[in-house]
Image: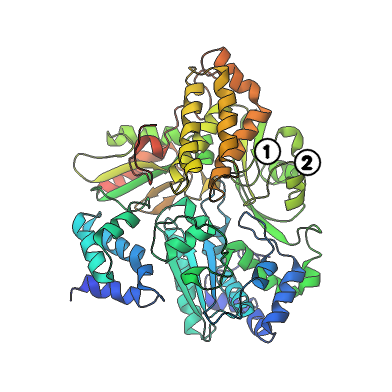
Amino acid sequence: MLLAGTGERDLTKLDEYLAIGGYAQVPKARAMTPDDLIAELQAANLRGRGGAGFPMGRKASLIDRASPKPKYLVVNADESEPGAFKDRQVMAEVPHRLLEGCLIAAHAIEAKDIFIYIRGEYLAEYEILQRAVDEARGSSIFEDVEVTVYRGAGAYICGEETALLDSLEGRRGQPRPRPPFPPVQGLYNAPTQINNVCTIATVPAIIELGAAEFAKIGSESSPGTVIFSISGNVVRPGNYELELGTPMRELIYDLAGGIPDGRELKAVIPGGSSVPALTPDQIDVPLDYDSLGALGTFFGAASLIVVDDHCCLVQLALRSTKFYMHESCGKCTPCREGTRWMVQLLERLEAGDGELSDIDLLDSVGDRILGKSLCALGDFAVYPVASYLRHWRDEFVAHVEQARCPFDGESTLEGIVAPSDAHTHHPVAEVPA
Amino acid sequence: MSTFAADVREIAARFPDARSATIPALRLAQERHGWLPPEAFREVADALGLTPAYCHAVASFYDMFHLAPVGRHLVEVCTNLSCALNGAQRVVDAFESELAVRAGETTPDGEITFRTVECLGGCGYATVVAVDNRYRHDVRPSHVAEIVEGLRS
């Protein structure tokens, strides 16, 4: 649905995209009133693909269209969640499908200005997308709508929607307190709808099939297809577009070829590095929002990181937490200080200098971050580590009892150098911890 | 009026609020200077009616802005989870040995800055290395000498 046709044709070119029926849904959507279009999107029950899973049509219905201010559509193309690399493929291979979705979504909220915020590192994808925008604009497809592609400059937090807005306004990308929520007061204090790349790129299919037909694809509570990114210790990592509800085992073993080198599966982080990990006996779960939720984890960014039995989970926790510490924007205390405390405790445990009370302290620091930070980044640091402590506590205890890492230098993550170890660029000023 | 200021104002005119041009302007300044020296912040501030301190505060937030001189070329290796699980540290080691610098340092001739970075969004093609912002996929330690040679020639 999202990647349809990409294997056969060069869909970065407008002619090729038009040849497969591209942009045909735009006049169809524009013939509908915004109210009817929003009703159709709501009936399709398209859940946001960026991480939170909020229904896209409901988001559109919350836009304050009576406001005298302009309305804005912002596309979140700041794909930065470790494990996720599908927005990038959509932009690189079928940028016009994203733009077609943008024009439809903009009509629903009566927006004339669309901003696509793409992470700064995606230079090749930016160039392809910008060429697609120029080509479509040249063919008068946009009519009176303007599309601006805006490059970020390297900050994970700008994938958080209000941090993204601050960044787009030319500020440090730090999350805003809510309320007010963006549909009421977003970009330049005007009503703003923010959606992920894959969410918007799914919209043309909804108009083409009609909401009723679209809702029959996938599982009942999570209709449609999703591009799953799978990486880590699998034979064939990559992006696989599947109907929602496909069993996780099928993706890991049939499509991605299972675990290489005769090793055993140890853990799966199902939604990108920020969600609780699953154990090998849980992988028959259907890949949809509610089924993963029932296991206490999240669908997240539909990005599976597969970990084999040669990896020390204290090292995995440490590397993951160093990332969130590095990317913490510094605005709120629980996240800024808490992630640093977590890193210090994990370093002590990994070095064999920890005590059993440090494991409890790690739980306790996590509890003091969870739900108490300004945005979800603090939670994202805690969720995976809390799950390792829950399912693999023995491994943490072994580090204390043996006073060293039980993997004895043989773990796959041994000695891995994180940016926070090696370079000084850090949004948080150095203070004595 | 200098071309830089004119270029920045042209970018600013595309946004409802000129402040939105701060990041594009800093990028432009960095392309001119190779990094962001104090005069770069003055130039951006003058073009947009902001203060140099404000521009510095914005730049210091983002990883792609360099507040200290860097080499003519930038080599960045992702060491986040999926790359790390697939041997990213061996690629880091190979670069350190080939360039004779540690991660975060620049070669003494000022040619190449080498650093580790957080997830670049290429997890399925580990290890990902960005060479002057162009991605190289599936990099193994055996590819490192050729990458460095390509930059030196």
Viewer-nearest of discs 2 and 1: 2
Location of residue A60 with respect to A359 vertically, above or below: below
- Residue A288 placement (x, y as % from top left): 74, 52
Q: Left or right of A61: which side holds B66?
A: left
Q: Chain of mark 1?
A: A
Mark identifier at residue B121: none
Q: Earlier in the sequence, mark 2 or mark 1?
A: 1
Q: Secondary structure at mark 1?
A: loop
- Relative placement, left or right, of A306 versus A116 is right
Q: Position of residue A233 (x, y in %)?
A: 60, 37
Point out the image quarter for the C terminus of chain A: top left
**Labels 2, 1: one chain:** yes
Q: In this image, B96 relative to A188: left or right?
A: left
Amino acid under disc 2: Asp
Which corner quadrant of the image does residue B117 belong to? top left
Within 10 Å of the Cα at label 2, are there few (<14), some (14-19), or many (20+) other Cα atoms?
few
Position in image of residue A250 (x %, y %): 74, 45
Q: Is residue B61 visible?
A: yes
The numbered disc on residue A284 is: 2
Q: How many dots with numbers?
A: 2
Can residue A288 be seen here? Answer: no
Snapshot colouring: rainbow
Residue shown at 37% from the left, 40% from the top:
B144
* Spatial separation of the CA atoms under disc 2 and disc 1: 14 Å
Residue A35 to residue B67: above or below: below
Q: Secondary structure at mark 2?
A: loop
